[in-house]
Amino acid sequence: MNTRNFKCFQIVYEERNLQVAASKLFLSPQGLSKIIKSIEDECGTPLFIRTKEGFVPTESGKLFYEKSKIIIRDINDMFSAIEAVNDKDKRFKMGFAAGTLRALDIHKIHSFMRDNPQILASWYECDNDRVLKQVINDEISFGFLVGKPNVNNVISKLVRSVEMVVYVHKGHRFWNVEEIDISDLKDEAIISMNEKYHIFHDILNACHLNGFMPNIVARVSEGYSIYQLVRDKVGIGISPRFFDDCDDVKAIRIKDAYTWDVYGIYRSDTLDYELCEKMIQDIEK
């Protein structure tokens, strides 16, 4: 039996509708029907009862569904294990703290990965603390972090520094000013990155130090969402200066604001020290 057809069966089972299942699988209903029929022929029993309301699984169909899920899981585990064996020589791995991909020169990093085959190419973002722990524990060779960590045996080098700004929509009371103070945000509806991002906690701390709780009306997971929500006048957005001004949205400087700094970090005793140094040099070119 072709195990790839298991997924076809599972989608039909879950949807109870051949047309809907076929569209999800990018197949024609006729082609999907033939696959289901071939599985039933091989099993020697009907797995569905065809009705006007849709495909109703038989008891054999219910059993086949549960067992096929186990088989697919085991097959996926097998291929993951094989992939891990094939990648064992690619020990150099990188981690990206949430938000850093937007600040970095992706073309340079991608070229560096491509030119150094010992790197296990991966574009996975997680929170700052997770990336730092992975570097400390030698789970990854190199990490991009927001803010400089103060950890023994970890080298930190600044690779990008971005100004923090407030994005406002046309017609807002800040539209014609060049600079605001953090205290000016007290009565504003604020759009921010969510708790996964370093910047969210920085905003809270800055506002608390100025004696007020910020009114954060939206917490987003992608930077461009801030831009869109500001444009639609949901609130004003606090973000590193990642976006260009336009007719409807512009960036306003925040007085005495810190810069959003991205560091490349790696252990001083890593086996890949030279490659880490080379990466820093390539990024800085």
Image: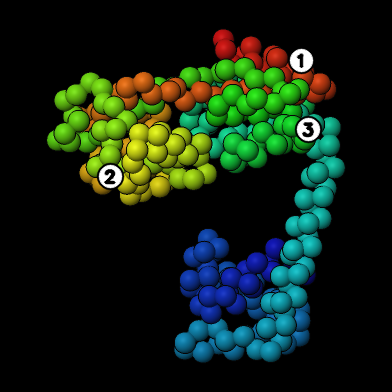
Q: CA distance from mark 2 to mark 1?
A: 47 Å
Give the amino acid at mark 3: Asp
Label disc, if present, on residue 138 of the rendered structure: 3
What residue would you read off at disc 1?
Answer: 274
Q: In front of the other: label 2 or label 1?
A: 2
Horizontal side of residue 128 vs 183, given as left or right: right
Q: Earlier in the sequence, mark 2 or mark 3?
A: 3
* Residue 203 visible somewhere in the drawing: no
What residue would you read off at disc 2?
Answer: 189
Crowding at label 1, few (<14), some or many (≥20) Cα neighbours within 10 Å?
few
Q: CA distance from mark 2 to mark 3?
A: 42 Å
Q: Earlier in the sequence, mark 1 or mark 3?
A: 3
Mark 2, secondary structure of its residue: strand
Q: In front of the other: label 1 or label 3?
A: 3
> Camera-side residue: 55 or 94?
94
Measuring from the top left, give residue 74's x and y in whole percent: 79, 63
**Up-down relation of residue 190 to residue 8 (above or below):** above
Give the amino acid at mark 2: Ala
Measuring from the top left, give residue 125's x and y in whole percent: 59, 39
Q: In front of the other: label 2 or label 3?
A: 2
* Residue drawn at 29 percent across, 32 percent down: 183
Horizontal side of residue 260 vs 142, given as left or right: left
* Residue drawn at 52 percent across, 44 percent down: 196
Q: CA distance from mark 1 to mark 3?
A: 16 Å
Mark 1, secondary structure of its residue: helix
Give the amino acid at mark 1: Glu
Q: Earlier in the sequence, mark 2 or mark 1?
A: 2
Which quarter of the picture shows residue 40? bottom right
Crowding at label 2, few (<14), some or many (≥20) Cα neighbours within 10 Å?
some
